[in-house]
Amino acid sequence: MVFLTYQRGALHDLADDRAAYDAVLERVTAQALARITEDGNLERPGCGDDIGDTSLGITSLLALAWQRSGGALDNLVEPVRRSLEFHLRMRVYRTDNPGYPNLRMRDSGEPYARYVLGDGEHPIGDWPSTAWALLQAVNVLDLTEGLIADDQRAELIDVAHGYWRWLTDVAYFNPQDTANQAIGAIVGALMLARHLGPKDADAVRERALHIYATEIRARRLPDRGALCPPEHGGAYDNNYGPISLSFLAQAHRVSGKQVFAADGDELARYIDARLASGGYDNGGPRYSEQHSGFEAVLGMRYFGRRIRSDLGRYLADTRWARHAAGPDGDVDGHFAFMLVWQTQDATRWYRTPGTAVARHQLRSARVSVSFDGSMTPALIEAGGTILLPAAVNRQHGIGPATDGFLLTRPMGEIRVRDAVAPGGLVAKLVTKPVVNRDHTLLHVQSLYVTDGTSLWLTTALERIPGVRMLAGLPYATALDGRLAKITEIGGLDLAEKGASLVAEGGTLVAGGLAVSSAGELTLTTPDFPGTDGSAYFNSPDTIGLTQEQAAFRLAADPRGYGNPDAGWRDIVATTALEAAPAPGSPDGLTVLAVRYAPAHTADGAYAPVLTLDEGGLTIRTEAFTALVGPPSGDAAGNPTLALRPAQAP
């Protein structure tokens, strides 16, 4: 069984009361006191990169434990002072790192932190390491009133101020085009200003807000109707995006500036729409399927309550449940500032699903559809099972297809209509014009209806030959509280080369999900040619890989710096569920009808009744009756939709 490596548990399942955080600090303190060297080094043994700020991060956690004890933990006083002295003497660099490519000023003498300690060994990470060192430093300043000597405090303030100058004047700002690092630097400056004299404080605060407006906010990228702070050139990354959300939360907490609240609200609503009901998401230009752990808690908790939706369902890497750790589990101080802020923030998780209509999501209970910018499903969850867009002949998606050509790319305005009905029914109608290979204009109407348990997808378009519904790639299912990759559907081993299975009774079971079609339903696995198995997902060459791993194998730079989303687009074919048109489709229309339901409900054929008249297409199922108006819409061109429970008159 292949479990998804990183998405292990919902963030809001982590205890976050005072006692829980005190217990975490007690464990960190015990490990730190056992680890500290004679010269005050608190770095994790074996740490080689992300190292320039890590000892100082542990220092901040010791100071936090001392402060929360009311100064009663006398045994922490000397380690805090000694470890701070270690950072000031051994981890503050003022000589340029050989080979660092992002300097605007040579031999400035300003302090910075190194990603790797050796001269010129791997200098590219010095900018984020310095931003992180600034954050650790300002936390130490906040937490050590009455704990460190005045001269040590003054030196740390001077170094932190120098870090800010290095980040903004000496180096190019945000050279890796990574918004979470950039917003983190802004947070550091806003916190630093509280420790400076009035003139310097005003200058730092004003500069930070100006840089945020011009270098970060103005460069946000559009995706799914939102403007997102970019990560490595993409609009969003599901590892770094939630970290940006945490930085926006802290920026608002520190400054009170409405711009951080507004931008955080927008990003939070975007993330909420991306997330499946069960908290799964994938995508991004850096870590396509990895999720951050504790680094996302502050932002998800803070903004989840602001937008009144359960962002805490976000599945995180719970191996990093409280703080960064090495492969051996030893505490690492690299993200210590997030743990500090979490303990200081009194916001509690908002645990109720949001009720506001979201254009790019349909969600009820444990059923959800997340739509991409073209209003094509990017992710479906039902029956505890995740479906990704399938690929046929390099065409990726969920929707109607003919001759391997997916009919989902819009060639005009996409119009959306949402509806609710008694019995917990929620629906979304998407109408969009598309063209086929012959450039024939087609009007595709897709109706998504859920009762919170099952999902019905009905797509209607003008009748053309050979149309089938590409119904998705069943990817992972809930198993023992985690998501495991699906390797068998309906008894067919997905590693079997070029296999095809026709669903008996029109239904196939994949994990916890039964997929039923009104027309013939088939399952195919890629018939990969020879040695090129890496381009065919769920072939024998990829059956043990996750989506992320397969994507990185095809990325331009498979070492981890490439874009796995781009790599995934290079997938030629995947396992695919395909549905034939429904029998009884009205004259002139092709209607494709698929039901996704929990496996234990798969006890009968799916046979919707379809009728067409001047008012539009009527769809009658066991759960609802829907009237989908003509593609032209009403007098204003808006789609028309009527929905009622099946038993209603």
Image (cartoon, rainbow, N blue to C red):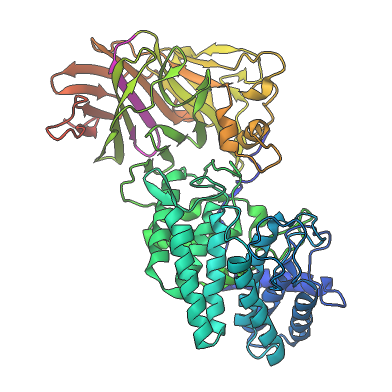
Residue 596 at x, y percent in the picture: 43, 28
**Magenta span includes 457:** yes
Tell me what residue is drawn at x 50 percent, y 50 percent. 230
Tell me what residue is drawn at x 63 percent, y 67 percent. 170
Q: Nearer the viewer, residue 636 or 454?
A: 636
Instruction: Relative to 333, say whether 319 is above or below.
Output: above
Q: Nearer the viewer, residue 550 or 585?
A: 550
Left or right of 545? Residue 621 is left
Left or right of 601? Residue 501 is right
Left or right of 622? Residue 42 is right
Q: Nearer the viewer, residue 550 or 558?
A: 558
Q: Image quadrant for the N terminus?
A: top right
Residue 318 at x, y percent in the picture: 63, 53
**Number of disc labels:** 0
Where are the magenta residues, as a range?
449-464
Residue 131 at x, y percent in the picture: 62, 66
Residue at the far right: name it.
38
Q: Residue 360's quadrant in the figure?
A: top left
Tell me what residue is drawn at x 63 percent, y 26 percent. 487
Instruction: Relative to 521, say whether 24 is above or below.
Output: below
**Magenta span includes 624:** no
Tell me what residue is drawn at x 54 percent, y 12 percent. 501
Asked whether residue 358 appears in the rendered view, the answer is yes
Residue 486 at x, y percent in the picture: 60, 29
